[in-house]
Image (cartoon, rainbow, N blue to C red):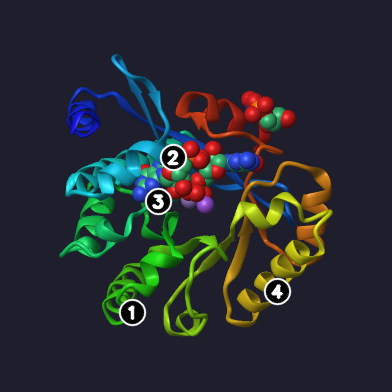
Amino acid sequence: QMLESHLLQALERGELDLHYQPQVSLSGQEVVGVEALMRWTSPALGKVPPDKFIPLAEESELILRLGEWALRTACRQAKAWQEAGLEGLRMAVNVSGRQFRQPGFAELVSGILAETGLAPRCLEIELTESCLVDNPREVQTILHRLRYLGIQVAVDDFGTGYSSLSYLKLFPLDRIKIDRSFVRDIDNDPDDAAIASAIIAMAHSLGMQVIAEGVETQSQLDFLGGRGCEEVQGFLYSRPLPAAELTGFLHDRR
Ligand code: G
Ligand code: G
Ligand code: G
Ligand code: MN
Ligand code: NA
């Protein structure tokens, strides 16, 4: 397929880039982490959004190469920020199910950490709910390896998957990300407000922290803060930015 062959070349020709979106703690209003988000600017096709090219890459082994590139690039960037004095910043990287379940995934990650010199506790892997439920036994084994290495794991887009909640107590997970579809109408839709509150309460009672995605307004922030949500991410603070721009943003705020 055309897009797919372009994508393979894109990786080799350096057309892929990562943008970074700040994650802000509600207690201290400080940037405690960033999420790395892939961007592709093709000379032939222009800007191709990740919702177009990631699902395509996931249909083949190509996602393994893109995913490894993203992990390595993000870890390298996190280490560079630390060396520039921005200590303790957590780097969150999206990982596809296929990538997570590839043989030797935990070893791949620990190799990248060793190579870049990034401390394991500064890396967080974001997995979607659907990725967790596919093969719970296998997933549990991999998650325990990551936990043993000291890497954090977050459940992305929480609330949108079709999953049993029982796996939440089975798996070693650090953080739940409330999907932005629940945050959007939190002020007007009592159902969304109830769902967000319930997710926060459940996560806390299971010993996990909560980050809300897609926070755009002060009143959304106030609602989430009032329910004990630890962190937020969204346009209220910043859209995802190129590394150089985020460096400026971090230096301004810290
Ligand atoms: O940044 P944006 O909202 O356009 O991202 C769209 C989707 O693409 C998000 O759901 C995000 O999870 C996914 N995505 C972005 N970067 C990566 C990546 O490096 N790996 C994977 N697997 N998914 C990504
Ligand atoms: O991996 P995930 O599905 O969480 O990807 C995050 C996506 O959400 C990115 O594509 C990013 O551009 C988008 N995003 C981040 N903050 C906001 C926000 O405040 N509002 C909206 N509508 N989208 C956001
Ligand atoms: O650029 P954008 O409209 O996505 O910015 C969203 C919010 O993030 C703005 O309201 C602004 O307060 C903040 N922001 C964006 N860039 C910077 C920056 O370089 N420094 C600081 N201090 N804040 C920024
Ligand atoms: Mn994500
Ligand atoms: Na998400």
* Residue 188, image x, y percentages: 84, 54
Q: Which residue is mark 1?
A: 136
Precedes in sequence: disc 1 or disc 3: 3
Residue under the point 75% across and 66% down: 228
N-terminal of the pair, mark 1 or mark 4, is: 1
Q: Which residue is mark 2?
A: 37
* Residue type at numbered disc 3: Asn
| Residues marked 3 and 2 touching at CB (< 8 Å) | yes
Queried on whether the Cβ of the residue with tag 3 lies below 8 angstroms from ligand 1, the answer reads yes
Which residue is more in the foreground, 230 or 102? 102
Q: Find residue 175 and report its horizontal and vertical position in percent.
A: 54, 66
Q: Residue furthest top?
A: 43
Q: In the rendered image, is residue 75 in sight?
A: no
Specify whether tag 2 is near ligand 1 (CB below 8 Å): yes
145 relative to 62 in the view: left or right? right
Q: Earlier in the sequence, mark 2 or mark 1?
A: 2
Q: Earlier in the sequence, mark 4 or mark 3?
A: 3
Question: Callout 4, which amino acid?
Answer: Ala
- Give the tally of numbered discs: 4
Mark sitting on residue 94 = 3
Q: Residues within 10 Å of mark 3 (few under 14, many from 20)?
A: many
Residue found 73% across the figure and 52% down from its top? 28
Q: Position of residue 208 (x, y in %)?
A: 57, 73
- The quarter of the rendering in which ligand 2 is drawn is top right
* Rendered position, 96 above or below 66: below
Q: Indicate the amino acid at tag 1.
A: Pro
Placement of the C terminus among the 4 image quadrants:
top right
